[in-house]
Amino acid sequence: MRTFRRFTSALAIVVAAGALAAPVPAFAEYPEKPIRFIVPYGAGGASDIVARIFQKALEDVLPQPVVVINKPGAGGSLGAREAKDAEPDGYTVLSTHIGLHTNRLMGVADFGYEDFEPVAETGTIELVLTASGNSRFENVDDLVAEAKANPDTVTHATNLTSVLHLAALQFMNEPDFTFRFVQVGGGGPRKPHMVGGQSDTSFFSIGEVAQEIENGDLRVLALMSQNRSPFLPDAPTIKEAGYDYDPLGVSFWWMVPNGTPRDRIDFLADSFEQAFAKPDVQKALADRAYAATFVRGEPLANRVRSEFESVKELVERFDISK
Amino acid sequence: MTPEFFAALGPILAAEPLLYIVGGVILGIVAGATPGLTGAMGIALMLPLTYYIDSKLALILLVSMYVGAISGGLLPATLLRIPGTPASIMTTFDGYPMARDGRPGRALGIGITASFVGGVISWLFLAGLSPPLARFALRFGPFEYFSMTLMALMLIAAVTEGSLMRGIVSGFLGLVAALPGLDPVSGEMRLTFGFHQLAGGFQPLPVLIGIFAVSQILLMAGEGAPVTERVTTGFSRMFMTLADWRRQAVNLVRSSVVGTWIGIVPGIGANIGSIVAYTLAKSASRTPDRFGKGSEEGIVASETANNATVAGALIPLITMGVPGSVVDAILLGALVIHNIQPGPLLFRNEPDLVYGLIWAVLVANVVMLALMLAGIRIFGRLATIPKALLNPVLLVMCCVGTFAAANRHFDLWIMLGFGLLGYVLQRCRVPLGPFVIAYILAPLLEKNLRSGLMMSAGSYEPLITRPISATFLAIALVTLVYAVVSEVRAARSGR
């Protein structure tokens, strides 16, 4: 906030000076041209929606407009590569998440979080473990009991090598059982697949299946979070079900290529923090049932690194990189 | 039909929504009628512009464009033998021969009327049968999807015109084009030959624009356009007579129902609907030999069914959030961007929006009929622009549309490559239809079979033990046997 005020007052002085003195002095205060947000996924996806929310919210925070560019392909690594190779001048910002880690660890991309400086985390998608509305499983205990009694028979619809797959591996780990994984793909095809009772269990984001949960088409077995969610107050957490670990989710991260000047990173983080605090943004995130997490600076760098380590451990333990 | 349903009609007939409907239909017709611009492309390009308008109006605009585009595809299909949208491929078989014989007005007139009838009949399904039909489609698992796709491929194989061998070559190349990219199950790179740009495979937009639009531009540039001059003559007998109505009644209803049903089936859109309806019309016809040479029944079947898929495909979209076609996948993106969660609860939570949207589909069809009949000469001119003017503009539009989809320069090379491939294939008289269909369906076929086999731990048994899947497979088998038998019979009688 302080930086912003300082900036606007500086701007006011410059504008006033410009009006008085001619010719206008060359003034190169960042940002002096539009900032590109590279969204390495298609229009309409969660990352795109969050990018558009912040594009709008940053309109009156930044003196320059934000341009959102969708660069989908290869699980997000095409757009990420472009951001990595961009000039580290603070004018290219990558929208990314845990996919950056999985692409690296699965060999889809030969670069990773070390090639970027994290700017801010603005919101998190929490996952729910669901079964069909008329499933024989009422809760996690039912599921674990059957899965342990009959190994490799309980089907789990997923999108292999995505965060959903990793979340399932993470969940299987402690009760020590194996799902029979079924590759169905993204939320679009997986939702009717689950409502129709084709597979026994699947992970979704809360927002994705809020209606199906409400009208009983899907049943929540557990919320993959340490704390209950305001969006699903009745859903027990995985911790309450007796498994105490830090479950994976999808946090929206903003990153810039390595070498971007520290003051520009701080300026961007300040801008994101201001935009994040706006009621419009809070409402837009809540409407989609995204948890309102904001992290920046050293805590964010630690979080990104520790998430990478968790994913790496899972990938190596279950040998899913190839 | 609830009181809420009828209450939603009034607001749609207000000035503002009507403006959006008329504007959407015109934009759609232009996109559909301009070779190289498809409805999907037009709607995708329009999507960013709707961020700033009310969500209901935005959806009305996009759905109206959808109706206009599928209908507008008839014009270049008939006048230029270029399907303006892939959904009009079947229309080229009969519309173009009729136009070449000096009856373009007649061909367009019955095509437009058929489009309207298809739109209205399928709308009745959309309005009345959404919930029960959606519940039925929920019973489809991977095995059902696989069998259904296989059935669709068999039906396509059955309609391939000319040499079966050339059709197979075309289809095979289409399958090959669908292979590169990330393996859907293991996530490994497949056939990318070290090009990281190919990690996402050959994307549909560059491939389709290349194979249909660019190759056609090359052909037109190299040989001179096949028609264009004929177009201005013979805009007579556009309206269907009572005798026409009587003759086509069964065809209209059958093609509407087929189109609606195929629209409802997720993933399969207007092109398959038109192909299946065309095949059925041909086999039911008393003059099947006229098909492919200017049969009115062929045009009616294709255009009725492709328009019927529009309302049909909206059923799974709004009731389950599952796109029924490529265009619906874009519409789903629009729903998400406007923060509307499609699903059974939509009818309960936002009746005004969902019923308003349903009414807008009907109004858009009426507007389409009026605009197309009144403006056919103007819209028809889109196809009569001298090719020296048309080709460069089209090529620029192809490039812009291809680039805009993913902002990737590499896609332009893909577009050009497939343009050259399409050019070579057409010069060798290899049909492009099977190529495109195989290219679009191959990933569905592969993903669903692999999902199914993962579910059953490798057993193929559910394919025949699950009743819906078994039904689809039986139809596929019957179609295959029928195609082979008629091929053999034709060869014998030819000798």
Image: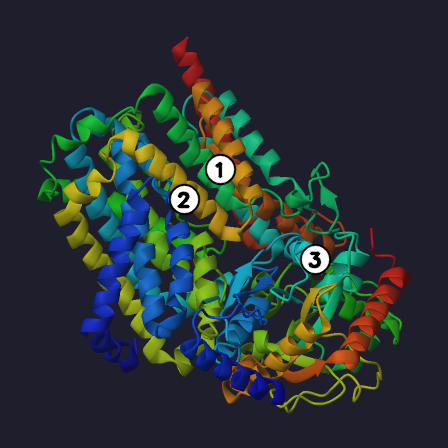
Q: Name the element at disc 1.
A: helix
Q: How are the colours assigned in the image?
A: rainbow
Numbered disc in front, either 2 or 1: 1
* Label 2 environment density (alpha carbons within 10 Å; few <14, some 14–19, many ≥20): many
Q: Which mark is residue B436?
A: 1
Q: Is residue B98 left or right of residue A70?
A: left
- The N terminus of chain B - image quarter: bottom left
Q: Name the element at disc 2.
A: helix
Q: Tell me the chain of label 1.
A: B
Q: Name the element at disc 3.
A: helix
Q: Does the rendering let one see residue A314?
A: yes
Residue type (three-letter) at the residue carrying disc 2: Asn
Q: What residue is drawn where x is 52% and y is 75%?
A: A53
**On the image, numbered disc 2 is attached to which residue?**
B271
* Label 1 environment density (alpha carbons within 10 Å; few <14, some 14–19, many ≥20): many
Mark earlier in primary sequence (2, 1): 2
Q: Which mark is residue A160?
A: none
Dots 2, 1 in contact, CB < 8 A? yes
Q: Is residue A91 left or right of residue A322?
A: left
Q: What residue is drawn where x is 29% and y is 30%?
A: B387
**On the image, numbered disc 3 is attached to which residue?**
A84
Dots 1, 3 in contact, CB < 8 A? no
> Mark 2 to mark 3: distance in Å?
41 Å
The answer to which of B48 and B244 lies nearer the viewer is B48
Q: What residue is drawn where x is 40% and y is 77%?
A: B347
> Mark 2 to mark 1: distance in Å?
10 Å
Residue type (three-letter) at the residue carrying disc 1: Val
Residue B424 to residue B43: above or below:
above
